[in-house]
Image (cartoon, rainbow, N blue to C red):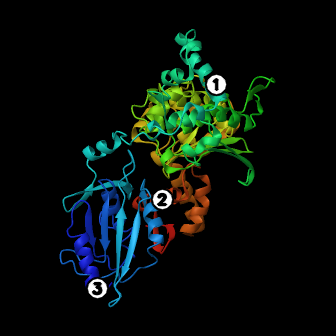
Amino acid sequence: MTELELKSFLKENFPKENENCDWKEYKNLKNSINGSEGDDLVSYVSAFSNMEGGHIVIGIEDKTFEIVGIQNLHSYNSENIKLTLVKNCINLSSENLEISEYITSDTKKIVWIVKVPKHSFRLPVYAHKKAWQRIGDSLVRMTNERLDTILNENFNKEDWTKVIIEDATINDLDEEAIKKARIEFVKRNPKYSEEIESWDNAKFLNKAILTIRGKITRACFILLGKQEEEHFLDSAVKIRWNLKTIDNQDKDFEIFHIPFILSVDEVYKKIRNLKYRYLKEGTLFPDEVLRYDPFVIREPLNNAIAHQDYSEKSRINVIEFEDDHLVFTNYGRFIPKSVEDVVLHDSPEENYRNPFLVEAMRNLGMIETQGGGIRKVFNFQKQRFFPLPEYNLSENKVKVTITGKVINEEFAKILINNPEITLEDIILLDKVQKQVQLSLDELKYLRSKKFIEGRRNGIFLSHDLIKKTGNKELLAEYVRNKSFDNDYYKKLILEYIAKSEKVKRSEIDNLVIPKLSEVLSKKQKKDKIRNFLFALGKEGKIVSREYATWEIKKD
């Protein structure tokens, strides 16, 4: 297109600025993409995504609508800018994010149109660690009202699993799967134990809420359908088991088909659930347990089946690693507000992606719907002193990692010697061990229980927790973490400068950094040393007469 044609195209499709459209001049992209918060592209992407999505036209002069074009792309192009936006806009979906580039044929001016998708379910989009929104022509930090609206969204997507397969009949269902379903149905519903024998398959399927007025649903076919008739669904409705080596190389795999009520048992049999032995302090007799309690395999697998977004035509994956951990993945956002919310409140979720399938699986004893399934998995791991399950909810997937051994022996010893610690406490202490940033409320709670010490950017497990173990290694680690008070370091620096006359900043760093708390990052340690030097200078004890060089101040 010529410049005139492009201008006409833009006026027709993006005629005015509003909450769904904005024009940005951005002639130089060097500091315009991820620069000043509230004024750069990532801030606007966050704002648009947190409303209903929209378009940002780059290379257009505000108000006049003149095409000025992007004159300095810096290191960006229409391909890598997408990755930059996803990386710097937390929770931004990459799926419907589009960047279209137009170069006028006569004047060679470059214009980009950024199509911003609406935020994912219950996930506000952040830029510069803040959520943004548009109010009129203004870009502002998200209001509490808008944040609450996003966090409390209801899931209203059509239930894919409730759809009736018009051409399918009972003859397309697997007889063994139906027999298995009858057995499990009676276990969950013992009141029908006497009369179920008189039911034909059609009546049973209606009672188990697998069919609707005798018609076969997708949910029914997922659980009970014959493998050779899987064309009624989609070839992607499968479970893939994969065995990987410690260095992530494929060693073996197998694909499991419908009926899933039988396939889950076959997947379970593939997993090498070996015995694990470990010694508790004070006894020579080892505890011997299975690496994975059967429930911690079946629950994540059945949850993946129940909550898979089948409309996306993706497989459910079960990955077994030889270093004794399992990874379950299914496609689709995690609908509850958070994993912690499910575990700690122990209450059923109000919304499901596949409510018809969920109810059918509940009737067949495949899943918990009273909020207890995930909590049970956490408790089983706690009882073994194994790491708690890890949930990764990025990339529109739910990824659950279950570890079948003790990884951090020191942390396990703390739990063994402090049996009064609750599951809720362990979840927070697990964050401390993994150096995950805690909220102010979480910090306040752990301090009130005397479980942690240190400041927010350098917290560590307290002496009250560690002393009960009597373990010298843990106590030594505590001393390293706690380090010493500020006066100790200031005296150390002062004595070093006094004996050396002139000392460079790098030499002071080499002296002090190894002695600082191990929970601090390298940057935090350097900032701490800078504060010590500033304090000594303010006290009139040292002075810097050359750049980054210190000496004793003389009267």
Tell me if mark 1 has few (under 14), some (14-19) or many (20+) residues whose alpha carbon lies within 10 angstroms of its own: some
Q: Secondary structure at mark 2?
A: helix
**Residue holding disc 3:** 3
Residue 256 pos. (x, y %): 67, 42
Q: Which mark is residue 527?
A: 2
Q: Secondary structure at mark 1?
A: helix
Front label number (2 vs 3): 3
Residue 120 visible in rendering: yes
Res 343 seen here: no
Give the quadrant of the C terminus: bottom left
Side (left or right) of 106 relative to 492:
left
Residue 401 position, x and y percent, is 61, 42
First of labels 1, 2 by sequence position? 1
Judged from the image, the secondary structure of the residue bearing numbered disc 3 is: helix
- Residue type at mark 3 is Glu
Foreground tag (1 vs 3): 1
Q: Amino acid at mark 2?
A: Asp
